[in-house]
Image (spheres, grey):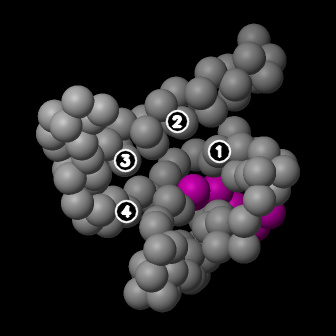
């Protein structure tokens, strides 16, 4: 690893979203002292656990891009808000899990 790892979380639903993630990774990689992790090639659960969670544990920061996914509707038809806010909540939980894991592994 050439520097401080930055986790890039960017949707890949469309080619434009994927291209944005690749571009962000390139900009970070070109910044002295930093290296980006962008999971463009992770497509199965085993790789998720092995690669993504490992990168989350090792990273010093994150760049999170939230794409518009429309409205999230609950089981009773109630509107929970935009998918962007729902995605932020999901990402926040992932970060809390990763940070908890990092703290348990770090020597005191």
If the image is split into quadrants, where does the N terminus sit? Answer: bottom right
Element type at mark 3: helix
In the rendered image, which quarter is residue 53 located in?
top right
Q: Earlier in the sequence, mark 2 or mark 4?
A: 4
Mark toward the start of the polypeptide (3 vs 1): 1
Task: Name the quadrant containing residue 7.
Answer: bottom right
Q: CA distance from mark 4 to mark 3?
A: 10 Å
Q: Which residue is mark 4?
A: 65
Where is mark 2, residue-wise? 95
Query: Which residue is the extreme one toward the front?
Result: 76
Task: Tell me the magenta residue range.
Answer: 1-7
Asked whether 2 falls inside the magenta stretch, the response is yes
Residue under label 3: 87
Q: Residues within 10 Å of mark 2 (few under 14, many from 20)?
A: some
Magenta residue check for 87: no
Which numbered disc flags the more N-terminal residue, 4 or 3? 4
Q: Quadrant of residue 39?
A: bottom right
Residue, x 46% and y 66% (percent of image)?
10
Disc 1 to disc 2: CB gap under 8 Å: yes
Local secondary structure at mark 2: helix
Residue 64, percent across and down? 41, 57
In the picture, the disc for residue 56 is 1
Q: Separation of disc 2 and disc 3 at Cα?
A: 12 Å
Q: Residue at x 43, y 39 (%)?
A: 90
- From the top left corner, tell me how far across and down residue 11 is, in percent: 46, 67
Q: Is residue 38 left or right of residue 77?
A: right
Q: Give the distance between the C-alpha atoms of the residues marked 3 and 1, in whole angstroms.
A: 17 Å
80 relative to 24, above or below: above
Which mark sits nearer the N-terminus, 4 or 1?
1
């Amino acid at each position: 690893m050439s520097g401080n790892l930055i986790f890039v979380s960017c949707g890949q639903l469309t080619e434009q979203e994927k291209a944005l993630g690749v571009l962000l990774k390139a900009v970070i990689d070109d910044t002295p002292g930093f290296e980006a992790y962008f999971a463009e090639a992770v497509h199965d659960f085993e790789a998720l656990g092995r690669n993504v969670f490992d990168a989350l544990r090792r990273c010093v920061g994150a760049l999170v891009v939230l794409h518009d996914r429309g409205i999230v509707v609950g089981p009773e038809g109630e509107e929970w808000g935009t998918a962007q806010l729902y995605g932020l909540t999901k990402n926040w939980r992932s970060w809390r899990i990763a940070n908890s894991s990092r703290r348990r592994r770090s020597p005191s």
